[in-house]
Amino acid sequence: MHIEKIKYFLDLYDCGSYTETARRNYISQTAVSQFIHSLEQEFQVQLFDRSVTPVAATQAGNLFYREASVLWEQYAGMKEKMLNFRKNQAQTLRIAYASVVEIHVLLPFIRKLKEKYPGTELLLSKVRMKDISGHLLKNVCDAAICLDSAFAGCSGIRSVQLHSGFYRVLAGEGHPLFDAPQITMDELYRYPLIMLSREAIGGSYQIMLEKTRQAGYQPDIVKNVMDLETEIFSIITEKLIGFAPDIFPVHDFEGHLRLIPVMDFNHSYTLDAAYLKTNENPAEREFREILTQD
């Protein structure tokens, strides 16, 4: 006896109709009839009087109903408890990110995830921007947080937009632009620049150069580095300037760094959370639900 099919018996007992029982369970009347017949064969009793309309339970059917009702309630309760256990049991969610900026955007979603699914274990790994889509495609991580350009043209990857904004100039204490409330592009491109390298950010490097040249400027890039931490160090110690998203947490540097708006500067960015459409990790689906909540 398949325990889930007990519901067919209970429904038939309650409504007295094979048609209605079939409708409630999205099966055919024949399937209902076959199951009731198999029960009667198994227990060697007649459970329903089919000579009347609606069908009525026999004495044996009434006894079976009392026992089956208890069994079904126990089974339904067990299913709910196991579902809750699965939701709260230790699951692992692997998230790749490219810089501290992604962590800054990610934190509010992580808090919500931990509140709703406290048993989920998070494994964060820092990955170069140009490699992050490969990590996702090779199933090294379940989700990746990065600039949307990192996932452009990647078949099988889906994404959710987390944040969008504009780049600003990142200047260190002692640089001539440090105290400026805002600057023009003429002022910006008078000074040597440091940028994350092509090896670090992939196609985003060329996009930045093309936008700059379209605006009529030739940037004086004197240094390329592999990560944001090295860029920040050079900005502070070598009096260079660079670019950073407008949400970069400069307050962490106790006044040694400033983000400066640039007038008529159209270098925008979008941060996405990306995932594989074939990912079967329940923790990834739970994370995606958190990301898409209003």
Image: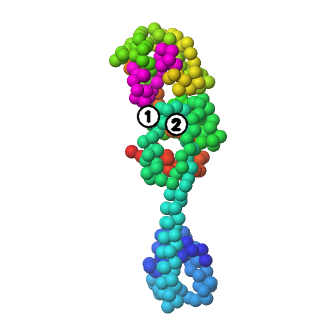
Give the amino acid type for the residue marked by disc 1 in the picture. His
Residue for badge 1: 163
Residue at the farthest left position = 181
Q: Earlier in the sequence, mark 1 or mark 2?
A: 2
Residue 123 place in picture, x, y as percent: 56, 44
Q: Is residue 68 magenta?
A: no
Residue at the farthest right position = 138
Residue 28 place in picture, x, y as percent: 55, 70
Residue drawn at 34 percent across, 18 percent down: 181
CA neighbours of label 2 inside 10 A, class few (<14), some (14 to 19), many (20+):
many
Residue for badge 2: 145
Q: Is residue 153 visible?
A: no
**Which quadrant holds residue 230?**
top right
Residue drawn at 47 percent across, 16 percent down: 241
Give the amino acid type for the residue marked by disc 2 in the picture. Ile
**Which quadrant holds residue 276?**
top right
Q: Secondary structure at mark 2?
A: strand
Vertical arrangement, residue 171 with respect to residue 85, above or below: above
247 or 216: nearer the viewer: 247
**Which quadrant would the C terminus be assigned to in this image?**
top left
Residue drawn at 49 percent across, 79 percent down: 70
CA separation in Å, label 1 and label 2 = 11 Å
Q: Which residues are magenta?
A: 234-260
